[in-house]
Image: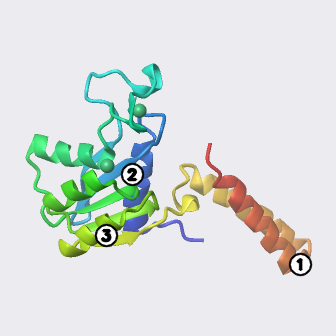
């Protein structure tokens, strides 16, 4: 079994890792900006630098939105502006489909491709704007088995068990069901 992951999976995995740094309890989002297969910035949704965190103080909710946090995409874009890194022609990998504000910022920053893992209130106007601006949008779901941090150990363990099953004359169907069960179990979150 090959464990080499694609660039898309690699960058999307990076965004999922960043999402783990989120300080908002309502939704954990990560964003990675990439140019020429190189990560130029990353962000997660959280408070301004030095601000209190939602996870400590609770969310600051107005009209059903947490107003304390800056979105992951914005944080990644602002990191580029802070350090003077051009975003023209870059790509962004986000764990969730961006909100309208972020979509506009992404377009204005000159980003040409948006990869997202999870559907999230995908707004039709966002798709309309992306189309007008000639920004490509593509869903790239993270294959969790591909990025599990202790992958080699888990895969080795599963393969060993499967081999033993084969040796003991288990049916293909039985082996398949055990394999799926273990894949399920090992890719479970939390
Ligand atoms: Zn919050
Ligand atoms: Zn947003």
Q: Which residue is mark 2?
A: 15
Q: Residue furthest right?
A: 169
The reply to whether the C-beta atoms of the residues labelled 2 and 3 are less than 8 Å apart is no
- Indicate left or right for 118 with 175 as reference: left
Q: Which residue is mark 3?
A: 127
| Quarter of the figure with residue 53 | top left
| Quarter of the figure with residue 75 | top left
Query: Label 1 crowding class (10 Å Cα cut-off): few <14, some 14-19, many 20+?
Result: few
Identify the residue at horizontal 25%, vertical 59% (top origin).
34
Instruction: Report, in whole angstroms, how far the alpha carbon at label 1 lies from the one at label 2.
Output: 40 Å
**Disc 2 or disc 3, which is closer to the eye?**
3
Please indicate, yes or no, whether residue 23 appears anywhere in the rendered image: no
Q: Quadrant of the C terminus?
A: top right
Residue 157 image offset from top left, x and y in percent: 71, 57
**Disc 1 or disc 2, which is closer to the eye?**
2
Q: Residue furthest left?
A: 84
**Above or below — where is 154 with respect to 128?**
above
Q: Quadrant of the N terminus?
A: bottom right
Q: Which residue is mark 1?
A: 171
Residue 161 image offset from top left, x and y in percent: 79, 62
Query: Label 3 crowding class (10 Å Cα cut-off): few <14, some 14-19, many 20+?
Result: some
**Disc 1 or disc 3, which is closer to the eye?**
3
Q: Secondary structure at mark 2?
A: helix
Residue 179 image offset from top left, x and y in percent: 75, 67
Decide which of tag 2 and tag 3 comes sooner along the chain.
2
């Amino acid at each position: 079994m090959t464990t080499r992951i694609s660039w898309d999976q690699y960058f999307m995995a990076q965004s999922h890792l960043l999402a783990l740094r989120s300080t908002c309890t309502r939704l954990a989002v990560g964003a990675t900006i990439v140019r020429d297969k190189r990560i130029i910035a990353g962000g997660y949704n959280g408070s301004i630098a030095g601000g209190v965190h939602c996870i400590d103080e609770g969310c600051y909710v107005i009209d059903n939105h947490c107003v304390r946090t800056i979105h992951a995409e914005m944080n990644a874009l602002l990191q580029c502006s802070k350090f003077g890194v051009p975003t023209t022609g870059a790509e962004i990998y986000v764990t969730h489909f961006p909100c309208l504000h972020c979509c506009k910022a992404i377009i204005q920053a000159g980003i040409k491709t948006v990869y997202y893992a999870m559907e999230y209130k995908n707004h039709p106007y966002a798709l309309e704007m992306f189309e007008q601006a000639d920004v490509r949008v593509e869903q790239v779901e993270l294959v969790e088995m591909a990025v599990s941090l202790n992958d080699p150990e888990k895969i080795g363990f599963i393969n060993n068990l499967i081999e033993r099953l084969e040796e003991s004359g288990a049916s293909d169907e039985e082996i398949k069901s055990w394999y799926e069960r273990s894949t399920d179990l090992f890719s479970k979150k939390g």
